[in-house]
Amino acid sequence: MRRAYLGWIVFVGVLAAGFAMVCLTNAVRAQGYGSDFSRFVGDYSGQVVIETPTGLAKRDLDVTVRREKEGFSLEWSTETQRPDGRIKSDRYFVAFKPAQRAGYYAPTDKIDRFGKRLPIDPIQGDPQLMAKIEGQTLTVYASLIADDGAHEVQTYERTLVPGGMRLKFSRVRNGEAIRAIEVDLKNKDQTQKLR
């Protein structure tokens, strides 16, 4: 009888441990930790030639992925040399944290032009953002309503490839494709090592 009692205790203990492991695994998945962003961390750069209404323009692209306290940050910049020689620069920064859905990340804040971190506010014109990691691809979706009421969706697919990442960008406005760019960005660390 004592042996049966001990067997029952062991059975209940194993059952409880298994239940705890399932709960822990589901909690980790729910927080988004199942998709590891660490392989994307780094600095990447490249160039692409795009067609503009005034002719062809060269665009320099830089992407930086960094670890953050709660997740990761993504900074990207573009510098476009226009046909008339003028340079146009844009820089964006968004921090993301794991969302309740496995593999997805929600935005936490941005940095303004003075370097101050601010919450993202779609009512003030910021896009609604979401990041997703699937396999070797980190995708960021940006959706916004323009002042004229038009709906615009921008999709940035950043896929890891040997030596860097491939960026596929698309911009759709009111269901119509406005722009699509595909360019390979080199890992800056690898570029420096090659010199």
Image (cartoon, rainbow, N blue to C red):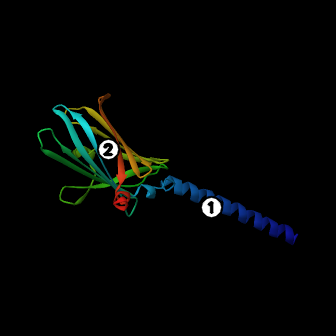
Q: Secondary structure at mark 1?
A: helix
Question: Is the C-beta separation of discs 1 and 2 under 8 Å?
Answer: no
**For the residues carrying marks 1 and 2, which lies nearer the camera in this image?**
2
Residue furthest out toward the front: 195
17 vs 164, nearest the viewer = 164
The C terminus - image quarter: bottom left
- Residue of label 2: 128
Tag 2 or tag 1, which sits nearer the N-term?
Answer: 1
Task: Estimate the spatial distance between the alpha carbons at disc 1 and disc 2, rounded to whole Å.
Answer: 36 Å
The tag on residue 20 is 1
Snapshot quadrant of residue 48? top left
Amino acid type, label 2: Gln
Residue furthest out toward the bottom: 2
- Percent position of residue 78, x then y: 24, 47
Residue furthest out toward the right: 1
- The count of marks equals 2
User: In the displayed structure, would residue 50 be above or below residue 194?
Assistant: above
- Percent position of residue 37, x then y: 44, 55
- Percent position of residue 148, x then y: 19, 32
The tag on residue 8 is none
52 vs 133, nearest the viewer = 52
At x 20%, y 39%, the residue is 57
Snapshot quadrant of residue 8? bottom right
- Percent position of residue 129, x then y: 34, 46
Q: Position of 49 compared to 68: left or right?
A: left
Q: Secondary structure at mark 2?
A: strand
Mark 1 is surrounded, within 10 Å at the Cα level, by few (under 14), some (14 to 19) or many (20 or more) other residues, namely few
Amino acid type, label 1: Ala
User: In the displayed structure, would residue 127 be above or below residue 71?
Assistant: above
